[in-house]
Amino acid sequence: MLHVSHTDSSTHTVIAIEGHLSGECVPVLAQYCRERLANNRPLVLYLKNVSGVDDQGCDLLRQLLSQGVRLRATGVYIRRMVEELKRECAARAFKGGDESHCR
C-alpha cells in the first residue's frame, strides 16, 4: 500500500509518498506525477517513510529523474538507493552531455 499526498507552493510542488513503492502502486504514482508535471512547475518527490521499492518502482524513479523531478528521501536504505539512482542518471546524462536534470 502506498499513501500519496501533495503540497503546492508558489514555486514548486512536493509529492510525498509513504509505504511500499511496488506493483500496482507504481502506475498510479506515475499517473499522479504526470498530472503534476503538466502544470510546468518544478516537482519534488519526497520518499517519506518508504519501506521498500521494487524494480518497477526503481524504473519509475529513474524515469522521473530523467524528466527533472527532484528526489528526496528519509531512511538510510532509501536515501542510499536514491543517491545511487542519481549517480546512474548523471552517468547516463554525462555520456549524452547534459546532467542538469539529475537532482
Image: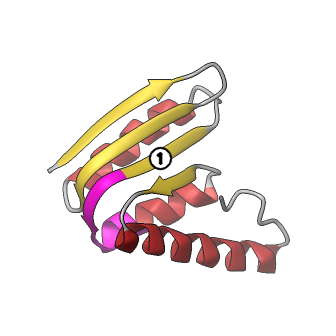
Residue 69 higher or lower than 92, as above or below: above
Q: Nearer the viewer, residue 75 or 35?
A: 75
Q: Which residues are magenta?
A: 48-58
Across and down, in percent, residue 90 comes to 70, 73
Q: Residue at x 51, y 65 (%)?
A: 62
Across and down, in percent, residue 9 comes to 57, 22
Q: Residue at x 65, y 51 (%)?
A: 68
Q: Residue at x 49, y 35 (%)?
A: 14
Badge 1 amino acid: Leu
> Is 9 displayed left or right of 55 in the figure?
right
Q: Which of the 4 image quarters holds residue 56?
A: bottom left
Residue 99 higher or lower than 31, as above or below: below
Across and down, in percent, residue 37 comes to 55, 35
- Residue where numbered disc 1 is placed: 45
Q: Residue 63 lies in magenta, yes or no?
A: no
Q: Residue 56 lies in magenta, yes or no?
A: yes
Across and down, in percent, residue 101 comes to 71, 57
